[in-house]
Image (cartoon, grey):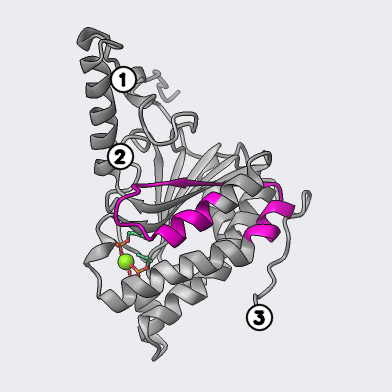
Amino acid sequence: MTEKVRAPFAGLVPPLGPSPQHVAIIMDGNGRWANSQGLPRTAGHEAGEISLMDTIAGAIEAGVRYLSVYAFSTENWRRSPAEVRFLMGYSRKVLRARRDELDSWGVRVRWSGRRPKLWTSVIRELEVAEEQTKHNHTLDLIMCLNYGGRAEIADAATKIVSRVVKGELKPGQISEKTFASHLYLPDVPEVDLLIRTSGESRFSNFLLWQCAYAEMSFVDLPWPQFRREHLWDEIAAYAGRERRFGGAVDKVRQ
Ligand code: IPE
Ligand code: IPE
Ligand code: MG
């Protein structure tokens, strides 16, 4: 039985200040959480489903427009064959089981990642969800599956080189803007707030280009314990930060 999650409801969320347009989450700590409960790592991945659904609902309530979630990295193939198999099968199952619920919340599901190696049945499930939800515009949920920041940058470089070879682009025309337009989802704005659970403070190859000026929050909870209220705490803290983008203003103390 698929566990129900409280649907997003406008008006429930406390005022948090200006919301980040794009939030990215490294959903980490599933395995350690499960092991600490005397359970196998896979039980942690299962428990993470509710965290994901609750966080999506909370993001909608807070007015977030894009939510990128790191579900499987290009490096996660290094895990045991059994864990990789579980993660592939479980991603497929969650996409299928939650598709209608997400659709009813106005969520547009999108995939970001590399095709080679990713299970065909998972790609198919992502495509079904993308097709079903393509007209929704409350929140874009970007499922990063077989995603790597370096892979994305290398893939963009490959696309640019092939356009140069065809004579469609001149090498002198390649600006940051041109480069960004060759990323997997060029219409998605840069990340405003990057959250990583589990207490680790690293990027682990997530959205390297898009996080150039992201505010970062490292949360001490394992992903299975993360809920929408924790997201709101991070959004409220974000609202209090000063983003300077390299600029500076004199504020001499009186
Ligand atoms: C994150 O939790 C989920 C994936 C990487 C798929 P982990 O599986 O990395 O759990 P820890 O970090 O080992 O506890
Ligand atoms: C990052 O977590 C990938 C996902 C959450 C999908 P990892 O657990 O794979 O990262 P490392 O190995 O601790 O850096
Ligand atoms: Mg981890």
Q: Residues within 10 Å of mark 2 (few under 14, many from 20)?
A: many
Describe the element under mark 3 as helix, strand or loop.
loop
Q: Residue at x 40, y 65 (%)?
A: 220
The residue pinned by badge 3 equals 1
- Under mark 3, the amino acid is Met
166 shown above or below 157 = above
Q: Earlier in the sequence, mark 2 or mark 1?
A: 2
Q: Nearer the viewer, mark 3 or mark 1?
A: 3
Q: Earlier in the sequence, mark 3 or mark 1?
A: 3
Mark 2 C-beta to ligand 2 under 8 Å = no
Judged from the image, the quadrant occupied by ligand 2 is bottom left
Stretch of the chain drawn in magenta: 99-127
Q: Residues within 10 Å of mark 1 (few under 14, many from 20)?
A: few
Q: Quarter of the image for the N terminus: give it.
A: bottom right
- Under mark 2, the amino acid is Glu
Q: Residue at x 53, y 69 (%)?
A: 93
The residue pinned by badge 1 equals 176
Marks 3 and 1, how far apart in space? 47 Å
